[in-house]
Amino acid sequence: SPESRSAGTPNRAPMAQYDVILFGATGFTGGLVLEYLLAKGSVKFAVCGRSQAKLEKCLEGAATKPDVFVLDVVASSQSELQDVVRKAKCVCTTVGPFALYGEPLVQACAELGVDYVDTSGESTFFRAMIEKYDAVAKKNGARIVVHCGNDAIPWDLAVWKLWKIVGSELTGVKILSEMKISASGGTLTTALHNMQAKAPKSELGFDPLYLVDGKKSECSTQIQLPKGSQFYQEAGQKGGPWIMGPVMANAVRRTNSLLEMAPGLKYHEAMLASSDTGVSTLMTVAMGTCIYMPFMLGLWQGMGVIPQAGSGPSRESMDEGFLTLTAYAETAAKSPKCKAVMKFYTDPGYKDTARMVAEAALAMADLPKAQKAGGVYSPAAACGEGLFERLLATGTTWEVTEC
């Protein structure tokens, strides 16, 4: 079945000493993942980074310290990288922008049969990794899972769960999001890179998101994102497009290709007007100028308009953050529509992204190779069941209100 993709003969490195090795622990998001894993207590994990001094500073005050590996992912050779990677069941990385720094880890994991999760919100990177490494990962039993933070776990899982409830009747999903999030330097740097980057031409002749077992999936997805502000009767307010909407849609597109949820699945999502994305008008203008004049970035950062890379929101502002998705399933029967509400109760962009990617890593470490073949996956297609249960056990709520 598409749920399991035929497993082939996994070539897993047999000597995994750790459930997870975390790359990027000295950055803002990576530091939050480190805190989360330390607080769980029962996880056998290690950290890897460029600077021994910075890694040791991150671990000050930790009751039990994980093992530390010092390695520059970008500057090191593949064999040096593989020496560390083979010690893990699953690699977890927050080192972005991923188009610049992500591929060496994906390559090492794909070749060694080691699982991989990341916090990338970059569709260009996702497509490139599918095209280059899906076949290698499948051959070696490595499950490479991209977009495992707020971009795009909540949206991807919401669509997947509605499909689990409604089944083959599903024809479309509409998601209306309300959120309060904070902007950080790293995310804005990645967003700028996304907007400046031109998608590389695929040699497949079709969108790599549809690549399954070497050919184009039968299950396409019709993405219907709003062009501007419009009134949503269901929510009693206006909603519109937002910068990460296409990334969420691409995760859903990949999930539908792999799991064959519905041929021609219609997907619509909007951010409600009551949301607060933490991006001021001046910050929007500054970002706009940097797309065309990249040298302006340092100036805007110096003025404090755009946060420095590596910086992030305060604990207080993260505690005030939240995300609520209201998801509507459209079915062949037209009515009644199935409606579900999924809630995240703290800042989804950082604090809850740390929880999401950590739980995704643990879900993959727990998932037997025989149950899921190797390949390059979206979160719901890789470990929907295990990840959904883990998120509900650690703070997310899911309520089906009409069905």
Image: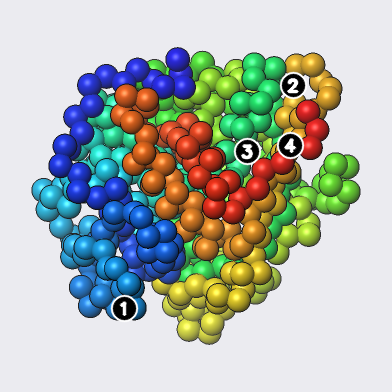
Which label lies toward us, 2 or 1? 1
Residue that carries the numbered disc 1 in the rendered image? 60
Q: Where is residue 393 in the image (x, y as percent from the top left)?
A: 55, 48
Task: State the image quarter where residue 169 is shown.
Answer: top right
* Residue visible at 50% across and 35% down in the picture: 384
Give the class, few, some or many, for how many residues have Cα within 10 Å of label 3's Cα (few <14, many ≥20).
Answer: many
The amino acid at mark 3 is Ala
Check contact, mark 4 vs mark 3: CB within 8 A: no
Give the class, few, some or many, for how many residues have Cα within 10 Å of label 1's Cα (few <14, many ≥20).
Answer: few
- Rounded to the nearest angstrom, the CA distance separating label 4 from label 3 is 11 Å
The amino acid at mark 2 is Thr
Quarter of the image containing the C terminus?
top right
Residue 226, placed above or below residue 351? above
* Residue visible at 43% across and 45% down in the picture: 360
Which label lies toward us, 4 or 3? 4
Residue that carries the numbered disc 2 in the rendered image? 331
| Res. 400 mark | 4
Residue 321, placed above or below residue 303? above
Which label lies toward us, 1 or 3? 1
In the picture as drawn, the residue positioned furthest to the bottom comes out as 303
Label 3 vs 2, first from the N-terminus: 3
- Rounded to the nearest angstrom, the CA distance separating label 1 from label 3 is 38 Å
Residue that carries the numbered disc 3 in the rendered image? 158
Q: Position of residue 394 (x, y in %)?
A: 54, 52
Check contact, mark 2 vs mark 1: CB within 8 A: no
